[in-house]
Image: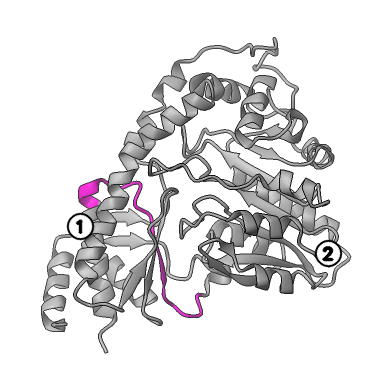
Amino acid sequence: MDYKALWEEYEAFKARGLKLDMSRGKPSPEQLDLSLDALTIADYIDDTGVDARNYGNLEGLPEARRFFAELQDVELDECIVCGNSSLELMFHLVTLSARQNAQLPVRKWLCPVPGYDRHFNVTEKLGFEMLNVAMTESGPDMDEVERLAADPAVCGIWCVPTYSNPDGYVYSDATVQRLAALTAANPNFTIIWDDAYKVHHLTETAFTVANMLKACKAAGNPDRAVMLCSTSKITFAGAGVAALAASSANVKRILAYLADMIITFDKLNQLRTVRFLKSQGGLEAHMRKHASIVRPKFDAVAEIFEQEFRECPGIAYWSSPAGGYFISLYTQRGRAKRTVQLCKDAGVTLTAAGAAFPYGIDAQDYHIRVAPTYPSVEELREAAHLLALCVKLSSQP
């Protein structure tokens, strides 16, 4: 490569004064506009006669519970519909795990990597030692999971099963079965099944993952998994609806824990959300509209990467997800931090290198999370060109 010419191109980028933030996976304004009709819904009585304006129904509005139980393919008594944040629910679940395992001198948690930085922040803040488990295209390395779970200090595992954050991988049926039947030394071992991208398909093929709650029941571990989803990237990020699915015994335990903090979640928002989406068919139609906005952005990044790296094989590779919100870009070892800094200096802010690993430490310093959803296609093409340029510059001997 002609590094002199590359540096001249980079200085030209800097001179343009770009200001583009791609550090988080945010819906674009065009995606948010898709749900504006939800704001005009004025109903407040659900189809069972419950007044959504009043106290009560901590487990969620009956109409909303039916919608989310169907979405997650569980029984009604296995579903709780809550506020806008599934992350908040996960914080509570890990808090409950810490209490269940309070007698342990050290508590540990399995973290498939690269993974979701906010997951890792939760377990770190609540005092768990985090153990890296490599991700594969079919899910976490199950040989490693099974080896580590022989330690009674290991209390649980994070999972993003459909279009994983950030690689976009889909867990295989075999992975689901092995997790469900896992011989864990800790009797309270918990699978937090964060199905954030369950309906965020980018292609005509809607990839699905086997139902973890049913798999755990069949394996004789009915209380092992808690499945979560939300509409935060379906309707409005600050006013979505989060739901969890768990065994009826776990539902009772979780509700008893929540009851000391909250009397009722926002049932008005629950009602307007399900009235807007109407049905599972309505949800699917709505998500096709999202895909029509998002897919060209993923395609633009992939196209630029293909063009830019064609003449310099070996310096980078990337994931090609069929859904979700992210693309993983892998540089040569020891080059990711330098690449991200070069981009920032030229006006494009990416997720910090290392953020997709516990404690922010990517031992190989080679992973960069790309979040294509918020910028326009034109901005993305510009940012992808700059990112590829910075990867080339960081590879300079």
Q: Give the amino acid type for the residue marked by disc 2 in the picture.
A: Asn
**Residue drawn where x is 66% and y is 73% of the image:** 144
Residue 179: image x %, image y %? 70, 59
**Residue drawn where x is 63% and y is 43% of the image:** 228
User: Which element carries disc 2, helix, strand or loop?
Assistant: loop
- The residue indicated by pointer 1 is 382
Residue 368: image x %, image y %? 40, 67
Q: Image quadrant of residue 249?
A: top right
**Residue drawn where x is 79% and y is 38% of the image:** 251
Identify which residue, 333 or 74, lies in the foreground. 74
Horizontal placement of 180 versus 269: left or right? right
Would you say residue 29 is visible in this rendering?
no
Q: Give the amino acid type for the residue marked by disc 1 in the picture.
A: Glu
Task: Give the foreground label among 2 and 1.
Answer: 2
Q: Residue furthest right?
A: 103
Disc 1: CA contacts within 10 A as few (<14), some (14-19) or many (>=20): some
